[in-house]
Image (spheres, rainbow, N blue to C red):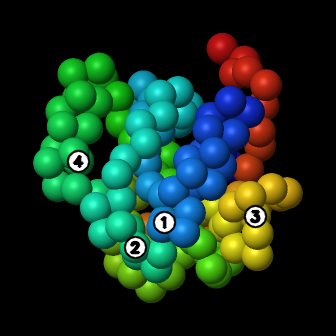
Amino acid sequence: MLTISRELHDEIIAHARRDHPDEACGVIAGAIGSDTPTRLIPMLNAAMSPTFYEFDSGDLLRLYRDMDDNDEEPVVIYHSHTGTEAYPSRTDINLASEPGAHYVLVSTRDGAHEAGDVEFRSYRIIDSVVTEEEVRVVERYDH
């Protein structure tokens, strides 16, 4: 199960709406071993595409160095789908390289980029096997 603060949940949705019609992408870092997402890092979709996302390799290298310096790891890796459901595509599955991360997908299809509810779903992707998990949004973490 992914437990995420309301603030981070809402920031992901805001980022997805801002970047629509292109896919938005980013990472939420947390302390190593904590499974608690705490620091959202919105990333630039280097592909600038409505159907595909990719992190800029230089940005990604800086991100991992920064997380390493802060004893953090990627707890959530998120991106948006602009015209399809919030379910990992074959490309998303092939690119999933962090077995410990929660992969969050947000769909801004059918006008959700402007208002209303968006699909917000989380998955574990390990060895190309996709498992959906429950998302629990909390006002604050209990620790």
Residue at mark 1 to residue at mark 2: CA–CA distance: 6 Å
Sequence order check, earlier mark of 4 and 1: 1
Residue at the far bottom in the pictured view: 90
Dot 2, how many residues are within 10 Å of its Cα: few (below 14), some (14-19), or many (20+)? some
Dot 1, how many residues are within 10 Å of its Cα: few (below 14), some (14-19), or many (20+)? many
Q: What is the quadrant of residue 74 in the picture?
A: top left
| Residue type beneath disc 2 | Ser
What residue is shown at x 67% (from left), y 41% (from top)?
A: 9
What residue is shown at x 74% (from left), y 33% (from top)?
A: 6
Nearest to viewer (mark 3 / mark 4): 3
Label 1: state its secondary structure: loop
Above or below — where is 64 with respect to 102?
Answer: above
What residue is shown at x 21% (from left), y 22% (from top)?
A: 69
Q: Which residue is mark 1?
A: 23
Q: What is the quadrant of residue 94 in the picture?
A: bottom left
Sequence order check, earlier mark of 3 and 2: 2
Sequence order check, earlier mark of 3 and 1: 1
Residue at mark 3 to residue at mark 4: CA–CA distance: 28 Å
Q: Residue 24: x percent and y percent? A: 48, 58
Q: Which residue is mark 2?
A: 49
Residue at mark 3 to residue at mark 2: CA–CA distance: 18 Å
Residue 79 can be seen, yes or no: no
Q: Residue 82: x percent and y percent? A: 59, 72
Is there CB contact under 8 Å for labels 3 and 1?
no
Is there CB contact under 8 Å for labels 1 and 2?
yes
Tell me, for residue 112, which label it has, or none.
3
Between 86 and 45, the one nearer to me in the picture: 45
In this image, 132 relative to 99: left or right?
A: right
Label 4: state its secondary structure: helix
| Residue type beneath disc 3 | Ala
Tell me, for residue 60, which label it has, or none.
4
